[in-house]
Image (cartoon, grey):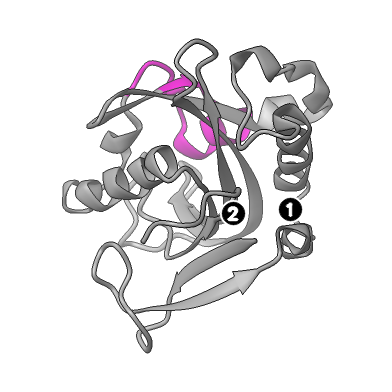
Amino acid sequence: MVFSYYIDRGIGLSEDCQLVRIIMLDVFSLPIRLANMPNSIRLLEVWLKWRGQNLFPVSGDIKPEMLGPTMSSVGIMKFQDPNQLIVRMMSTDAVELFGRNLQGEDWYSTVPPEQRPRRVERFQNIRNTPCGIFNVVSRFRTKQGFTVEASSILLPAGDTISGQISKIYSTIDILSERQFDDNIALGIAPLAEEYEFIDIGAGVPG
C-alpha cells in the first residue's frame, strides 16, 4: 500500500506540525499518479525489479544499465551521518535547475536555514521507516528568470554488508515553467509544497 501525506490545512498534523490530509493508495496505482512523469515511472519500475521480493534493493542488486536513457535523469544521495546527506551523483535535469553540479555537497544545505530541520526529518523518515517520498510539486528558480515547477520521487537503497538504508535514488520531471517569482532564491531547493510518503512495505512514518 502507499500512504500519502500532503498539506491541506484541515485534518491532522504532519511531522513538521503542519495540518495535513492523509490518503491511502494501492502501490500499483502509483504509476497512475505519475502518468505525466516518465522519468519517475521508469525509476519506480526499475527500482521494483532491483528489490525483487525484498523490502528495498541493496548495492549488489542495483544494475544502473536497466535505467537506459533515464539514467541521465537519476540522482543518488548518500547518508553521511544523521545531519548530512551527500550528493553522490546529480542528474542532468537537476544540474540545469541549479545552474551547477552539487556533487559532493550536502543536500540539506540547499534549503533555506529555517527549513533545514524539516528536510532532515523527512529524509530520516526514508531511512528509518523505511519508505519513499513523492514530491508532488517543488519549485526552483532558474538563471533564465523562470520558476520551474517539478515533481520527483525518492526511493531507498541499502548497503550490501550492513543491510541498512544508505542511499536514496531520485529523479525529476519538469511540469511547467512560468515567470520568475521573487520569493524563490537562485540555487535553493525549498521544501516541496505538496509531498507524499510512499509505503514500500514497512508502513509510513507514525
Q: Residue at x 43, y 18 (%)?
A: 103
Q: Quadrant of residue 19?
A: bottom left
Left/right of residue 122 with respect to residue 177 in the rendered view: left
Q: Within 10 angstroms of label 2, few (less than 14), some, or many (20 or more) residues?
A: many
Magenta span covers which residues? 87-105
Q: Amino acid at mark 2?
A: Ser
Q: Quadrant of the N terminus?
A: bottom right
Q: Is residue 188 visible?
A: no
Residue 106: numbered disc = none
Q: Residue furthest left?
A: 114
Q: Nearer the viewer, residue 52 or 95?
A: 52
- Tell me, yes or no, whether the highlighted magenta stretch contains residue 120: no
Image location (x, y in percent) of residue 154: 55, 42
Q: Residue at x 66, y 48 (%)?
A: 173
Q: Which residue is mark 2?
A: 151
Q: Residue furthest bottom?
A: 10
Check disc 1 and report its element: helix, strand or loop: loop
Residue 37: numbered disc = 1
